[in-house]
Amino acid sequence: MVAYQAKPRLRNVRTAKHATHMRKTHASRARYTGLVRFCGVLGVVLCAVMLYVMLMANLTSLNYAVSRADRQRASLQAQTAHLDDRLAALRSDDRLAKMAAQLHMREPQQFALVTLPPPAPQGRSRLFLSSLASWFGAK
C-alpha cells in the first residue's frame, strides 16, 4: 500500500499580495475606526445642539416681537381713548351752542330744500372712462 502523500501547496503570488494588501488596509482602517466613530457621534450631537440653540434664538426673538406688539397695542389703546375723549369734548352740545352764540347764529325759522339739475356729460371719452370705472367697481 502506498501511503498518500500530500503535495506541497503552490502559492499563488497574486493571492498572497492581495491578502497582504487586505491585512494592511484592515489594520489601517482599524486604527482610525474609533476616531471616526467619535467624530461622527460628536457631529450628530453638535448638530442637535445647534438646532436647539437656533430654535431657542428664534423663540426669544418671537417673544421680543410679541412684547413689542403688546406695548404698541397698549400705546394705541391709550391714544385711542385720549382721541375718543377729545372727540366727545369737541362734539358736545354745550360747546357747539357756545360757538354758535359767538358766531351770532340762531335756530332757523323756516327750512328750504334746493334741488340741482344733474350735470351734463362732458364728452364721449369721459362717458367711456366713467363706464369703465363703474364696471371695475370704482366709486
Image: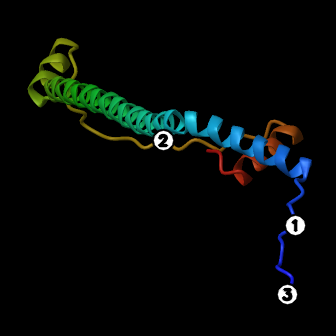
Observer-nearest of 116 and 126: 126
Is residue 16 depicted above or below 40 in this figure? below
The residue depicted at 13 percent of the width and 29 percent of the height is 92
Element class at badge 3: loop
Quarter of the image where the N terminus is located: bottom right
The residue depicted at 39 percent of the width and 41 percent of the height is 112
Q: Which circle marks residue 7 in the picture?
A: 1
Specify the amino acid type for callout 1.
Lys
**Number of callouts:** 3
> Is residue 42 toward the left or the right of residue 21 in the image?
left
Give me the C-alpha separation between circle 3 and circle 1. Answer: 18 Å
- Mark 3 or 2, nearer chain start: 3
- The image shows residue 34 at horizontal and vertical percentages of 49, 37
- The residue indicated by pointer 2 is 114
Q: Which residue lies furthest to the left in this view?
A: 94
Tag in front: 1 or 2: 1
- The image shows residue 96 at horizontal and vertical percentages of 17, 24
Observer-nearest of 75 and 2: 2
- The residue indicated by pointer 3 is 1
The residue depicted at 54 percent of the width and 36 percent of the height is 36
The residue depicted at 82 percent of the width and 79 percent of the height is 3
- Mark 1 or 2, nearer chain start: 1
Give me the C-alpha separation between circle 3 and circle 2. Answer: 148 Å
